[in-house]
Amino acid sequence: MSSIRAAICADDRWYPSDAAQLRFVLDEFFSNVPDTPSGGELVALIAPHAGYQFSGQTAAYSYAHLAGAQYKRVILVGPSHFQDFGAQAMNRAQIFETPLGDVPVDETLVQALSAHAPINFVPFDREHSLEVQLPFLQHQLKNFSIVPVMMSHPFYHFGLRVRNECETLAHALAPLLDADTLLVASSDLSHLHSYDAVTYFDQGFENIISEYNIGALIDYMINEGEPRACGDMAIVTTLMTAQLRGANTVRVFYRTNSGQVTGIKEPGQYTVGYMAAGVYKTQQGFGPKEVL
C-alpha cells in the first residue's frame, strides 16, 4: 500500500478544502492573467507560497505559462519553515494528497537524485511551501509526478556557506531536467513590518534576478541578515540548475505584496512580498553573469 502525505494546508487558511470551491478560485486567478507569450524555452518557474487570498493571484501569473504544456514530472524546491531537516530533505510519502486528487512522487527520479546529493528522508512534515503549489499544477497539467525537495538553510540566516549546498543540489538536479521535466522554486520575498521597506527591497530583488546575476543575488540575500526571500536557497538552486541546462534569461511576470493585496499599508504592518517569474533558455540575451 502506498504511503500518503495528507493535505495539511487544505484548511481554508491556505487554500479551499472543497474541491469545487478550489477549482472556482483557481479559475478566477487564471482568468485574471493576461495572455503574454514569453518566448524561449521554459526551464523553471518561481512562484510564491502564502495563503491563496494573499499570493494566489501572483502564483497564477507563473503557472499560466503552463497552458497547453505536457510536462510529466515537476521538481519542486522550497524552504522548510518550521524544522531544520538539513541541506535538503523529502517526505518519504509516495503520494501527495490535495482536494483535487493524488499526486504521485516520482520514485525513479528521487533515487537518481539521492545518488548524487544527500537527501534526508523524513516521515512527516508540516511544510506548506510545496503543497500549495500542487493545486496550480493540477489545474494546468494532466498527469504528472513530483520530486518534492525541502531546503532548511536560508542565506539570510546561515550565510555564504549555503552556496555550497545549492551548488551540490544543482549539479545533482541538472541531469534530471529534460523536455518532460519542469523545475519550480517556491518562495515569497521580503518579510518585514514595513510596506515601504518591502516595496524597496523587493524592487532591488527584481532588478538583480532580472539580470540573472547569481553572485549579486546571494550577496543581496545575506545583506543585513533580513529575509529578502524566505526561499532564497530554493531560488538560487533553481537558477544554478537552470544555468547548467543552458538557461540565460529570467523574466519577472508579476510582483506584488500583501499590503497591495489587502490595501493595508500603514507603518508597522507586517508585509510579505510575492513574485512570479520564469527562467528561460533563449537564442538572444546577455546570459547569466557567472558560470558554475
Image (cartoon, grey):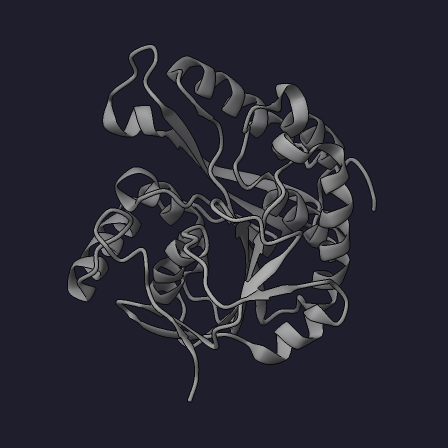
Q: Which of these two is toward me, 4 or 205?
A: 4
Q: Which of these two is toward me, 93 or 20?
A: 93
**Residue 138 seen anywhere in this rendered image of the structure:** yes
- Residue at the location (61% across, 41% down)? 250
Viewed as shown, does residue 159 lie left or right of 234? right
- Residue at the location (56% across, 29% down)? 206
Viewed as shown, does residue 62 lie left or right of 54? right
Viewed as shown, does residue 117 lie left or right of 79? right
- Residue at the location (67% across, 76% down)? 111
The x, y position of residue 110, in whole percent, is 62, 73
Viewed as shown, does residue 251 lie left or right of 243? left
Image vertical order of residue 178 relative to residue 211, above or below: below
**Residue 35 seen anywhere in this rendered image of the structure:** no
Q: Could you tell me which quadrant the N terminus lies in? A: bottom left
- Residue at the location (24% across, 46% down)? 13
For the image, the number of numbered tags is 0
Image vertical order of residue 119 relative to residue 259, above or below: below
The x, y position of residue 179, in whole percent, is 62, 69
Image vertical order of residue 182 relative to residue 232, above or below: below
The x, y position of residue 158, in whole percent, is 67, 35
Q: Which of these two is toward me, 63 or 35?
A: 63
The x, y position of residue 269, in whole percent, is 32, 18
